[in-house]
Amino acid sequence: MDPVTATEHLHSDCETESGSIGTWWPSWRPTSMSLLKTTESKILACIQNDLWARFVTLPNQDRIWTLTIPNKVVHKPAEQAPKTPLVMVHGFGGGVGLWIRNLETLSRSRPVYAFDLLGFGRSSRPHFPSDAAEAEEQFINSIEQWRQSVGLDNMILLGHSLGGYLAASYAIQYPSRVSHLILVDPWGFPEKPTIQAPEEAQDPGTQQVAKRPPLPLWVKAVASVVSLFNPLAVIRAAGPWGPGLVNRFRPDFKRKFEDIFDDDTMTQYIYHCNAQTPSGEVGFRAMSESFGWAKRPMLERVHLLPPSMPLTLLYGARSWVDSSSGHRVAEIRDQAQTKVLLIDNASHHVYADQPEEFNKVVENICNSVN
């Protein structure tokens, strides 16, 4: 059986709902995979380039929802080798629709792939183990099986937030497949700081823990329930009030895309992505001590990346993610092939806050790779 199934051009209607990953929910929860598909299609219809969407079936029959945007180079010498594709991995609670400001621009010189992580968006939502290492391995295995199924020899791998953590883990395990690693405001790098006793804090010789930027309201809201429930359980528990909660706690998503959509399209997309079966959330919860910290911090493993692998870390200058971790990565790697860049006037969602600057930086990185 061909591992790539349900291939479709985005603007055709050939996919049936039997190709979706469905689940039963009480009728008072206003969501379904069909509504997610409809909302996502409205977002992706803004892309003028050819855009192909399909489910990629893994050996265990899990399916990864995948977008492919072929590059638009018209006059290409026949002898020129294909450009290394850019593969984009979204963050926690997200999906491929959040790259709407980036996909078309970044496909000008090379193919671009974006997929919904296992357990998120329109991808399959399987069971994840409660052990941190096993949950991480399930994510990584799905990415590698996706790569094999799609047929990519190597790639420029870009991950945002949780996607950055997983991209780094993937690059450690499969370094020959990554031509350049780009981590955008990556989650899970620093160790959770220990709380100092009062007498230690008064000792001038005691190393002080660097202060992190204040957490936004929505992060605090998620953190308040993460120890008892899956991170976004409150959205599902709210039933018909769930979409309103997303609008209340994530109004920034509407603002970031208001020049494209003058309604609640983007917050509806976030709601439908996260009101489904909490599969990826279970995996994320297994890997985290609380929303802000990983049980297996990536700073403890980043030295395992090959010194020759180019690595760029991009941070929003106003993000709640502390960019000092990026500078620590550069120190650990002895500055080898490592760059840390800050994008002004950008918060955690750098790609949406300052899309032109983000696209320019990523394009320049891609142009350094054949």
Image (cartoon, grey):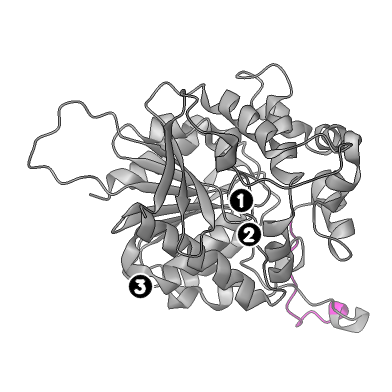
| Residue 121 quadrant | top right
Image quarter of the N terminus: bottom left
CA neighbours of label 1 inside 10 A, class few (<14), some (14 to 19), many (20+): many
Q: Is residue 205 magenta?
A: yes
Element assignment for label 3: loop
Q: Are marks 1 and 2 in contact (CB under 8 Å)?
A: yes
Pointer 3 residue? 307
Pointer 2 residue? 187
Q: Is residue 186 visible?
A: no
**Camera-side residue of 218 and 33:** 33
Query: Label 1 vs label 2: CA separation?
Result: 9 Å
Which residue does the image show at 89% across and 57% down from the upper left? 224
Image coordinates for residue 143, horizontal then vertical, percent: 47, 60
Amino acid type at circle 1 is: Gly
Which residue does the image show at 43% across and 64% down from the upper left? 144
Whichever of callouts 2 and 3 sits on the residue coming sooner in the sequence is 2
Q: Which residues are magenta?
A: 201-212
Which residue does the image show at 75% across and 61% down from the upper left? 211
Which residue does the image show at 77% across and 36% down from the upper left? 31
Pointer 1 residue? 91
Amino acid type at circle 2 is: Trp
**Where is 337 relative to 215, above or below?**
below
**Where is 163 relative to 237, above or below?**
below
Which of label 1 and label 3 is nearer to you?
Answer: 1
Image coordinates for residue 37, horizontal then vertical, percent: 61, 33
Element assignment for label 2: loop
